[in-house]
Amino acid sequence: MKCLNCGQDNKETANICKKCGRDLTLPPAWFPDWRWHVRTLAVIYTALIVLFFTAKFLLRRLPPPYDTRNIPSEMTPWLKYIANSGAESSRAAPASSDPYGTPNK
Ligand SMILES: [Zn+2]
């Protein structure tokens, strides 16, 4: 009987390997092959993609206070600079030379 750990040939009646001492009465350990890895990763990625689109769909149906796409600009003054520097938007705050949108002096 060949030892599954070190490959040493042992007697068929041996209970432990004479070279490394592995218990030869134990069944061989199971190791995942590449098909198992591919299948497992496919299941994980599919679940994540489905979860992402489900969450995205459900979040879009929330009423206005929880709709993160329409947060009032007063609540996010730090976004004014980004909105003004990017493409023109209907919701963009008035142009200002003050990037941090500090209140009137
Ligand atoms: Zn061995």
Image: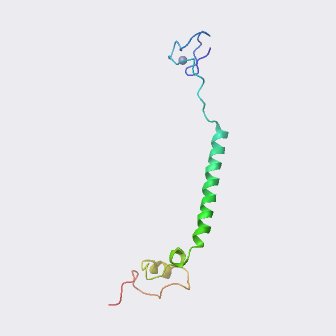
Q: Nearer the viewer, residue 31 or 87?
A: 31
Residue 102: x and y, percent? Answer: 36, 84
Residue 97: x and y, percent? Answer: 41, 86
Q: Nearer the viewer, residue 75 or 102?
A: 75
Q: Quadrant of the C terminus?
A: bottom left
Q: Nearer the viewer, residue 77 or 14?
A: 14
- Above or below: residue 39 compared with residue 63: above
The colour mode here is rainbow
Residue 86: x and y, percent? Answer: 52, 79
Q: Residue drawn at (56%, 86%), measured in percent from left and top?
A: 90
Q: Residue drawn at (59%, 72%), measured in percent from left and top?
A: 60
Q: Where on the picture, by quarter, is residue 67?
A: bottom right
Is 47 placed left or right of 23 in the picture? right
Q: Quadrant of ligand 1?
A: top right
Q: Residue drawn at (60%, 30%), measured in percent from left and top?
A: 30
Q: Where on the picture, by quarter, is residue 49?
A: bottom right
